């Protein structure tokens, strides 16, 4: 089978483009450099002769364009000193023009109206860029960007509230609950939710969604639960507790509770609070927030022309700061010791265990059931203290007498920095419990001045709300990554700021490398799947699932690779990904297997924590061989290879 040749044709477009090339490249000769040697001029002549003789095919078109541009840039300033003819040069320019037009025609799909070269290069500034860019490059970077921007401006309303016309027809009543941590604002909102015939609770964390579901069920109010990682849909339930990202905007509710609304200022997730406040169809909307969010929430509600009232909540227990430096051996029953990494939680718990004190442990990677068991032991007095990350700052209503900051710096995903005032107050506010501890105490190992100043300093007023991109970007005539970048670059005005779309763009780019024919809708669905892309084990599973989806094949159930604490936690995250990928991409997950497996792994993790073996284990969990730094998941290479062979044999059968 012969390679298709690109025909050299004399259309008006190709003649125009060839003459444009000649003018642009000859213009370079005005900046003449030192005359090259005779040998170099001879090589120039040889290069031109080679390009003149070269046969252009579909396969070598892009290579021809790159080589021709490079050669012309080098030769044009000294063309008169070479032994080449004008006919050779004209032939090369004609070939370049026809090849450029061929590549541009191949790009066209016929679904949209594309500009011809006369329109594209009417602007001299755009034409000048042809020296370094192809016609297709300039279409994508100049014309397509302009067209996409015009389409976005046309499709997306100037005011974000107008993206929800059905909600704008309603006259909603907002109750804005203002208060610091542990002031009862969420409790008041949930009382209204329980009394409603139909309601929704929107949470920043799946842990809180699960807690609210259990609280409502305990109060004889059937309630379903939905998060990005799991669901528990109860037949006949008119209430639902979900993470804010899973809010249902098509349903009408009597009462909607949106918790921790100060997170509207979060660059990555704040857009979901904005969307929920603007779009949820709730006759009565309860917004729970810290004082610094009051003004921005009032501004948004007033802009929606909805009614509102403010309910101020105050602490029923005093908060007392102790300047005396804390020492770990002085930990007492009812203390919550705060650190900012999983490793620190395990280390501190192990130190306490060695000194005869039992600790419950709370950190982000723990499954909900494990957290619940850990908290239950603390509530029942089976453990003396809680060692936790800042996950303790939201929603965990525990009988804590004293909050102790063992660390005052945290890694925020970009850098290690000092805690800011609102973070200190959010965590410290968990100290004290009415009817049990009438005073809450706050202490620290170091930097007492910083902690006290943070407690005394009012939080900075929130000036703006983050805004997410709309699904109308799917209708824009360009690549979804380009559409996201264009959308992000466009000003918003008013009191909104565009969210960070870095994660979405990075995942879209990753997905394109796995399979380059996904639709824009598929790419957005894939990039919106919640998982920890910083975890290598989970990321590799995501890649495997994406590849299987591209072939329309079923996804497999993840398998456990080891029994160390890290391996068990990673496996639980893989189980979460199995569910969320299946739900997002149209598969039917095995709910019975998934529920049983999650319970099993959560129990194993809890036993690992209670055995205090997580830091001491340096041997393979299967055969007992010593582990080295190259071994993963708590098992040695020999056992890992054996497991892989067994898995392969099972899959073959």
Image: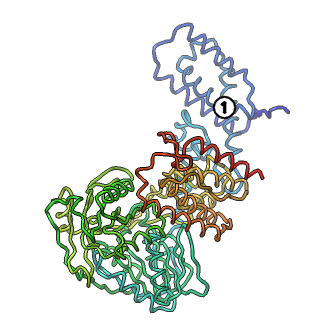
The one nearer the camera, 363 or 602, is: 602
Work out whether residue 494 can be spotted. Answer: no
Q: Secondary structure at mark 1?
A: helix
Q: Residue furthest right?
A: 1
The one nearer the camera, 45 or 163, is: 163
The one nearer the camera, 233 or 126, is: 233
Question: For this view, does 523 lie left or right of residue 124?
Answer: right
Name the residue rendered at 60%, 15% in the picture.
Answer: 44
**Vertical relation: 315 (above or below) 505:** below
> Which image quarter is the N terminus in?
top right
Instruction: Indicate the quadrant where residue 641 lies.
Output: top right
**Vertical relation: 86 (above or below) 274:** above
Question: For this view, does 343 lie left or right of residue 512?
Answer: left
According to the picture, the residue beneath numbered tag 1 turns out to be 96
Can you give x and y, in whole percent of width and height, for residue 363 in the image?
40, 62
Work out whether residue 650 can be spotted. Answer: yes
**Vertical relation: 29 (above or below) 472:** above
User: How many C-alpha atoms fall within 10 Å of the one at disc 1: few (<14), some, or many (≥20)?
Assistant: many
Name the residue rendered at 73%, 49% in the picture.
Answer: 649
């Amino acid at each position: 089978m012969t390679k298709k040749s690109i025909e050299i044709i004399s259309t008006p477009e190709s003649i125009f483009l060839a003459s444009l090339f000649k003018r642009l490249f000859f213009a370079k000769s005005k900046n003449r450099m030192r005359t090259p040697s005779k040998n170099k001029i001879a090589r120039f002549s040889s290069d031109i002769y080679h390009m003149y003789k070269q046969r252009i095919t579909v396969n070598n078109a892009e290579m021809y364009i790159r080589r021709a541009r490079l050669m012309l840039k080098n030769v044009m300033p000294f063309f008169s000193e070479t032994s080449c003819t004008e006919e050779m040069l004209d032939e090369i320019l004609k070939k370049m023009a026809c090849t450029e037009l061929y590549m541009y025609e191949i790009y066209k799909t016929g679904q949209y109206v594309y500009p011809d070269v006369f329109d594209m290069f009417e602007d001299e500034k755009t034409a000048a860029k042809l020296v370094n860019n192809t016609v297709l490059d300039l279409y994508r970077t100049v014309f397509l960007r302009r067209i996409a921007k015009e389409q976005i401006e046309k499709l997306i309303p100037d005011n974000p509230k107008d993206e929800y016309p059905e909600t704008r027809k309603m006259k909603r009543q907002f109750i804005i609950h203002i208060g610091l941590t542990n002031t009862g604002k969420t409790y008041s909102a949930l009382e209204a939710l329980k009394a409603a015939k139909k309601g929704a609770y929107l949470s920043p964390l799946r842990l809180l969604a699960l807690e609210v579901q259990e609280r409502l069920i305990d109060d004889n109010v059937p309630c379903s639960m939905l998060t990005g990682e799991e669901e528990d849909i109860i037949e006949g339930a008119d209430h639902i507790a979900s993470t804010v990202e899973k809010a249902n905007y098509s349903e009408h509710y009597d009462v909607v509770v949106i918790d921790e609304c100060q997170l509207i200022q979060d660059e990555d997730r704040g857009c979901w609070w904005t969307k929920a406040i603007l779009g949820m169809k709730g006759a009565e909307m309860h917004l729970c927030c810290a004082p610094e969010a009051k003004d921005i929430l009032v501004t948004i509600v007033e802009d929606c022309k909805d009614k509102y009232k403010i309910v101020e909540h105050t602490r029923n227990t005093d908060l007392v700061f102790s300047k005396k430096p804390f020492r770990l051996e002085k930990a007492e029953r009812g203390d919550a010791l705060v650190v900012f990494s999983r490793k620190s939680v395990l280390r501190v718990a192990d130190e306490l265990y060695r000194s005869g004190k039992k600790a419950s442990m709370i950190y982000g990677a723990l499954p909900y059931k494990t957290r619940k068991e850990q908290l239950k032991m603390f509530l029942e007095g089976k453990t003396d203290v809680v060692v936790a990350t800042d996950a303790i700052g939201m929603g965990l209503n525990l009988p804590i007498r004293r909050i102790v900051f063992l660390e005052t710096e945290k890694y925020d995903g970009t850098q290690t920095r000092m805690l800011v005032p609102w973070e200190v107050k959010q965590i410290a506010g968990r100290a004290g419990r009415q009817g049990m501890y009438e005073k809450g105490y706050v202490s620290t190992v170091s930097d007492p001045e910083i902690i006290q100043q943070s407690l005394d300093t009012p939080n900075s007023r929130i000036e703006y709300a983050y805004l997410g991109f709309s699904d109308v970007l799917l209708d824009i005539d360009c690549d979804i990554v380009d559409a996201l970048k264009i959308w992000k670059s466009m000003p918003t005005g008013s009191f909104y700021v565009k969210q960070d779309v870095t994660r979405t763009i990075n995942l879209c780019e990753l997905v394109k490398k796995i399979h380059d024919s996904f639709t824009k809708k598929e790419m957005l669905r894939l990039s919106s799947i919640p998982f920890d892309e910083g975890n290598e084990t989970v990321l590799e599973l995501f890649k495997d699932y994406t590849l299987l989806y591209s072939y329309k094949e079923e996804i497999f159930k993840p398998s456990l690779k080891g029994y160390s604490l890290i391996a068990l936690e990673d496996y639980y995250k893989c189980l979460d990904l199995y569910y969320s990928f299946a739900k997002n991409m149209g598969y039917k997950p095995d709910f019975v297997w998934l529920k049983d497996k999650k319970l099993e792994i959560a129990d194993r993790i809890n036993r690992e924590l209670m055995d205090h073996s997580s830091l001491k284990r340096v041997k393979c969990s299967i055969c007992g061989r010593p582990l080295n730094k190259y071994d993963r998941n708590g098992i040695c290479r020999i056992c890992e290879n054996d497991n892989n062979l067994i898995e392969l044999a099972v899959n073959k059968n």
